[in-house]
Image: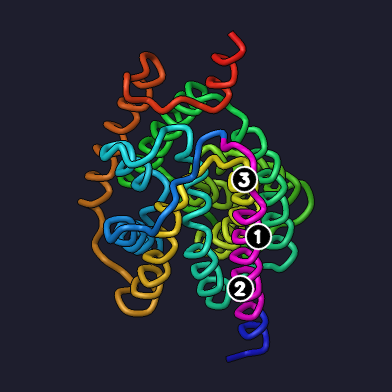
Amino acid sequence: MTWIARLVLLAGLGLATLYVLAWRRAERAHTGPASSPATSGRPGVGHVLLGFVTNFFDTLGIGSFASTTAYLKFRGLVADEVIPGTLNVGHALPTIAQAVIFVTAIAVAPLTLIAMVAAAVAGAWLGAGVVARLPRRAIQLGMGIALLVAAALFIMKIVGFLPPGGDALGLTGGLLLLAVAANFVLGALMSLGIGLYAPCLMLVSLLGMNPIAAFPIMMASCACLMPVGSLRFIRARKYDKRVAIGLALGGIPGVLLAAYVVKSLPLQWLYWLVVVVVLYAAILMLNSARQPGPGALPLASDAVEARRR
């Protein structure tokens, strides 16, 4: 193992440790009423399996946000307004594992990598603060649109519409500034549940970079931005703790199995299945925003307003 690989590994372990400690501290520090109570108790086997499966395929290029959202929506496991926070909190640790693996395996220009990652982190910090304060209907609309975007990106990937890219492993000048600005926006959208992987792959390819260089960029971006954004969701109590812990516990073994044992699979048929599932979930989410069902959980702000009346 080279000194760079050791440094990345130590940085990943350090980031994961700091994230877990900050998560525990935020949980212990919370004493006030929850805007949407994080579920207490231990995760179930189903939550852990969900984390394993979604992060296994995430490492192979399927993505985890859209598929996890679809499952949570189908099963009605969590309230709609806490889905973005649950995704970011639960998938953070597995994504850190992915970043360590791919940053050490694929070379990319350090300035391009660091600048784009920093921009994504800044975008996530601002975006999570906004999303954590949004009412349920706004989040349902945002998630519905996010799922439609995800389905469109899946279809573009299946039919080969994504740009082939070039040979560059880094950017300079105006192209670098454009990439940094775009990754800032993508980091902010992560807070609403729009995965960064596919848009980032399109971005670097359109700017003339080798598509393989997108993997360390997009995974390192998510590995750094998700803990930052997640803490805002945790403090605002806009996530489901039980599901998030299950995603984290099952996700890390899924990442390791996909990266070191399976490595690749013929996934064409699975992409089409994901498109169908994600489109259906988008319809459900948008329908919920149009006419919330009677089983919807009230926000704490709604309860406060009711008491005032």
Magenta residue span: 8-34
Residue nearest the observer in this picture, 253 or 220: 253
From the viewer's perspective, tell me whether residue 29 is left or right of residue 173: left
Outermost residue toward the right in this view:
173
Label 3 to label 1: alpha-carbon separation: 24 Å
- Residue at position x 32%, y 37% in the image: 73
Task: Kindly indicate the quadrant of the structure image that contains residue 304.
Answer: top right
**Given the image, on which type of amino acid does mark 1 rest?**
Arg
Q: Quadrant of the N terminus?
A: bottom right
Residue 191 x/y as whole percent = 57, 41
Q: Which residue is mark 2?
A: 12
Give the SS element for disc 2.
helix
Magenta stretch contains residue 77: no
| Sequence-first tag of 3 and 1 | 1
Q: Residues under labels 3 and 2: Cα distance?
A: 19 Å
Labels 3, 1: front one = 1
Which quadrant is the C terminus positioned in?
top right
